[in-house]
Amino acid sequence: MTDTTKISASVVEDRNSWRWGFTPQAEIWNGRLAMIGFLAAILIELFSGQGFLHFWGIL
């Protein structure tokens, strides 16, 4: 194999790495954690028969 047939791989960022600040990785993690929170609120309402705020005694 000669040098002209080698394929150079570009550097790919790890989209799942944990980084601080306003980065694409932080926004991905923010979205994932928000989805878990919404799912938890929906499950609480389904299984308790009360609204989320009533379940925690806020209302």
Image: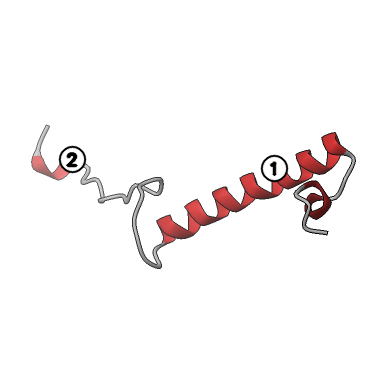
Left or right: where does residue 6 sit relative to residue 24?
left
In the rendered view, tell whether residue 47 sits above or below residue 12: above
Q: In terms of image quadrants, where is residue 40?
A: top right
Please, what is the three-letter code of the amino acid marked with disc 2? Thr
Q: Quadrant of residue 7?
A: top left
Give me the residue at 83% from left, 52% from top. Answer: 54
Residue 37 is situated, as x and y percent measured from the top left of the image, at: 64, 48
Q: Secondary structure at mark 1?
A: helix
Q: Is residue 45 left or right of 16 when viewed as pictured?
A: right
Q: Which residue is mark 1?
A: 40
What is the x, y in percent for residue 27?
Answer: 48, 59
Q: Nearer the viewer, residue 5 or 50?
A: 50
Query: Whole-percent x and y of residue 15?
Result: 40, 49
Residue 50, percent across and down? Answer: 88, 45
Give the mark nearest the N terminus, 2 or 1.
2
Q: Where the N terminus falls, by quadrant? A: top left
Residue under the image location 43 percent in, 58 percent down:
26
Scheme of colours in the image: secondary structure
Dot in front, 2 or 1: 1
Residue to which mark 2 is pinned: 5
